[in-house]
Image (cartoon, rainbow, N blue to C red):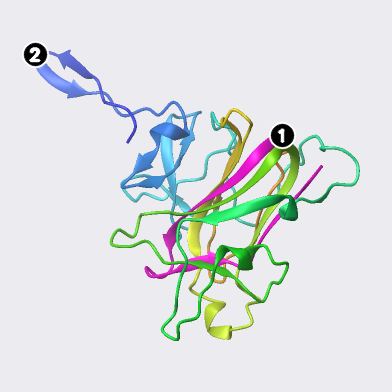
Amino acid sequence: MGAVATLGVVSGCLSFEPFRCEGDGDCVFDGKPGQCRLAEQVCVYPDSSCSTQWSAADGECMSAASGDSSAGAEASDGTGETDAPPPCGPDPRTLIAEGTVWASSVYEDMDGAMYPESLAVDGDYGTSWLSAGSGLTESTPSMFRWTTDEPRCIARVAVIGNGMHERQELRRNFGFGGLIMRVYDERDQIAFQRMFSLPDSPDPDAIGEPGVEGVKVELELFDHEVFYSGGFSELEIDGT
């Protein structure tokens, strides 16, 4: 976790004060990022085995953080329903073509077919970018980034799952347990951050409405449904 417990002396015996988080940065367990419920200073983590989709580090099912993250992240059930922030301006347009994309890895199947990052920005829900998986450690996240040369007001970011892929065998079990969506400003500081739980398969769409200026949108995708791959159909970015 991110902080160190403090020692106290009670009646000549050592006792440990319970861990209390102060922000999302304190909540990393076995390489998996979580959220800090600031009201209780308790870390929670995406967990599809819980009806709430969240658990504590010891596996106890917990309710999600209630939107009080120090970094502005909100808990989500992956449906994309949010409270709309102030708009970036009238008539937002698609910004995808105004930037470049990068992915941490690309999957190649047994037939030699490749699934590069360009397939996630081609406007076709029948294709997908797929990563080469999490490697030897299943908690290792995959990364996907979109970068533009000039600041843009990012009104909407949508990550569309594989449910409409042209290959039926890739529609299920090639997603993730959750993702963190971030927007970075010109100083490379996080201007917006939100975590999504992605229960079931195919993954539900994850939709954020940052309403901030930024030059980079980053997706950190974790808990691969299969260890050797995972991806999504389309990244959509709208703004001005």
Amino acid at pointer 2: Gly
Q: Which numbered disc, 1 or 2, marks the residue that appears first in the sequence?
A: 2
Q: Which residue appears at 80% of the width and 34% of the height?
A: 86
Where on the picture, by quarter, is residue 18? top left
Q: In the rendering, at what x and y percent does residue 226 appear?
A: 40, 70
Q: Determine whether 23 is above or below 84 in the image.
A: above
Q: Determine whether 66 is above or below 142 in the image.
A: above
**Which residue range is magenta in the image?**
213-240
* Frontmost residue, 232 versus 122: 122
* Frontmost residue, 47 versus 146: 146
10 Å crowding of disc 1: few (<14), some (14-19), many (20+): many
SS category of the residue bearing label 2? loop
Using the rendered image of the protein, determine whether residue 52 is visible from the camera's viewpoint. Answer: no
Residue linked to disc 2: 12
Q: Which mark is residue 213?
A: 1
Q: Determine whether 119 is above or below 188 in the image.
A: below
10 Å crowding of disc 2: few (<14), some (14-19), many (20+): few
Quarter of the image where the N terminus is located: top left
Q: In the rendering, at what x and y percent does residue 217 appear?
A: 62, 45
SS category of the residue bearing label 1? strand
How far apart are labels 1 and 2 at the CA level? 55 Å
Single out the residue that lies furthest toward the front: 149
* Frontmost residue, 181 versus 104: 104
Q: In the rendering, at what x and y percent does residue 44 appear?
A: 43, 43
Q: Nearer the viewer, mark 1 or mark 2?
A: 1
Amino acid at pointer 1: Glu
Q: In the rendering, at what x and y percent does residue 20 appear?
A: 37, 27
Where on the picture, by quarter, is residue 214? top right
